[in-house]
Structures are given as structure tokens and as C-alpha cells.
Image: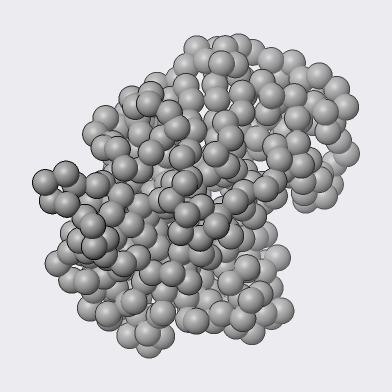
Amino acid sequence: MRVLVTGTAGFIGFHLANALAKRGDEVIGYDNINDYYDVGLKLARLKFAGFSTDEITTNRLITSKTTPNLKFIKADLADKTTLDMLFKEYKFDCVVNLAAQAGVRYSLINPQAYIDSNITGFLNILECCRHNATPNLVYASSSSVYGLNENMPFNTHEAVNHPISLYAASKKSNEMMAHTYSHLFGVPTTGLRFFTVYGPWGRPDMALFLFVDAALKGKSIDVFNHGKMRRDFTYVDDIVKGIIKCVDNPATPNPAWDAKAPDPATSSAAFKIYNIGNNSPVELMEYINAIELKIGREISKNFLPLQAGDVPATFADVSDLVADFEYKPNTSVNDGVAKFIEWYCEFYGVKA
């Protein structure tokens, strides 16, 4: 297959692009390499994938030195001219849109970034898919869309009308925009609501990275909601397996869809929403304990209230992914955390 993966310098996009290329797909990576977090880490991911960082310049398509079927272009989703050029030249079999302005807390500080990337950028992707008859669009949504909902496990067949951050609102907007294009223009779209993804090469603004970084530097960590958070932590390899299932299986219309009792997760159009998570929420303190177990010492903790925009718990009902694709995450928190710490120590040249 010929696949466009946006957000390739990002955490999940990096892992997905490499996995698709490894199995033999022709992959075009796309990323603007913004400075939301350490650009050096993003460039290191690309270097690990075989790209010469000296060759990375805006709007220049380059080829991996180690994986000839993996290419990359530095460009922004707002750059519709470059997107149009790529779509016309490569006629993608599938587009996986993982490029987005991430982060719940940052959306309280810089809301415009979420409109530019998550709304305008996603519209450009939809327009390109529409005008090039792209047979499959898979895109990143988020567990954040569940907002004030406390009915767990979170189920895609229930409405999500109460987001509590602009980031979450932008992701719900993506789902509604996707449905519009599926209905009006026949673009098959699959939205994936990710649940707290972690693992090697992870983002520096995520809890695991922050905790490990502080612990190995002998600093204390901030533990919000006084440690009473529960998250459906999902290891990145398990996430990638789920995404690839959706790459290989475009959404189809639900013949049983009833407009008088509409199911939010399906449609009479080729539209589907899945939760993609571990289906096994873990107490934040247990997550921290997994770090302490690996590094062999206790971490000093600052217990703080719940932050604005955060939810106290997430829990994914992944029964649809299981039923449709036999999806089953199998990486335990202890194993996943240990793998992250091993990567961190090697990458930064430190000892646990």
C-alpha cells in the first residue's frame, strides 16, 4: 500500500511509519517539526528512521538511507499547496492523520494553535481525500472527548457532548467533520480515540517522561488529584497494531444504522469511531510504583489538586475493536514502563 502518515516526527507517527515501512508499505511521512516540545527529540526520531537531518528542509521530499520505501517531507498541514501536490502525485491508498496540536493543558494557554492545526489542518486533509478519491482515512481523536462523562468504561456508542478543554473540543470537531465528508463525498473515515499512550520515544510533556526525568535527576514529581487518577495507559506497540488494523480495513456503512436512534460510532455512511486503549485502567500511584520498581528507589512526590481540563479517570471499552479485528493489547504496565526507562537511559546516556 501507499500510505501518507502525518505527524511522523511525533511519538505515535514515528512508530507507525516505521512499522508500515517494515512490513513493505510505501510510506510518505509528513510533519512540520514544530517546537511544542524538544525539536531535538523529533529530529532524533527521524534520524533513527534513517533520515539525514541535514537534508530536512521545508517542502523537500527525502528518502530514508536505511529504508528506501520510507520518505519524509517537512511541511505544515496548513500548507494546502504541498498537500495537494503529494496527493496528486502519490494517489495514496490510505492516509493516517496523526499530526495535531497535542496537550490538554497547553490548550488553556495557546488556544489558537488548536484551531490552526486541529481544525484548519484537518479540513485540508479531508479536502485532499475528497478531491483525490482517497479510499481510506484514519485519524487521531482522543479519550479527552469524553469530558465530564463518568459512565465507565467509556463507550463510543454514547454521546460526547461535554468536553472540558479546547483540545477535546477540537478532537470532537474532527469526528463531526469526518462524518460530514463520509456522508457528502463518500470518504471512508475511521476515528481512533487514543487512551494515554506511552513507550520508548515518548513525548516529554507526558506523565511517564516527566516522572522518569525527574526521578533520575533526584527531583520530586508533581502528582495531581492527590494521586487518585486512573488512566487506561496503553503501550505504543499495542496502539500501532490497532491503527494498522484500521489501515487495512476501511470503514464501511452500517446497514443497521437507524436515523431515529442514531449510533454516534457508526453511520449510514462509511464512518466509524473506535476506542483504542488497554481496557484496563491503572491507578496513577501504581504507574509510579512501576517506575520505582525499575529504578530501585522511591520517588519524592508533591501531591496537588486536579488541574483544569483534566479528568480524574479514563477507561476504554474496546469491544468494537475486539469484535471487528480481534484487537488485544498485551503489554503490562510494568513491562511497558521498564522498556521506556531502558530507552530513556540509553538515549540520554544516564543510569537508572
Relative side of 97 to 211, left or right: left
x and y percentages locating residue 298 in the rendered image: 81, 19
x and y percentages locating residue 313 in the rendered image: 48, 25
x and y percentages locating residue 304 in the rendered image: 55, 12
Name the residue located 38 percent from the left edge and 38 percent from the top edge. 155
- Farthest residue toward the left? 260
The residue lying toward the viewer, choosing from 258 and 296, is 258
- Farthest residue toward the front? 256
Which quarter of the picture shows residue 254?
bottom left
Name the residue located 41 percent from the left edge and 74 percent from the top edge. 94
The residue lying toward the viewer, choosing from 129 and 179, is 179
Name the residue located 35 percent from the left edge and 52 percent from the top edge. 273
Position of residue 283 relative to residue 132, above or below, is above
Scheme by which the image is coloured = one colour
Relative side of 182 to 134, left or right: left
**Can I make out residue 74 in this image?**
no
**Can I make out residue 299 in this image?**
yes
Quadrant that contains the C terminus: top right
x and y percentages locating residue 177 in the rendered image: 23, 55
Position of residue 175 relative to residue 150, above or below, is below
- Farthest residue toward the bottom? 89
Which quarter of the picture shows residue 90?
bottom left
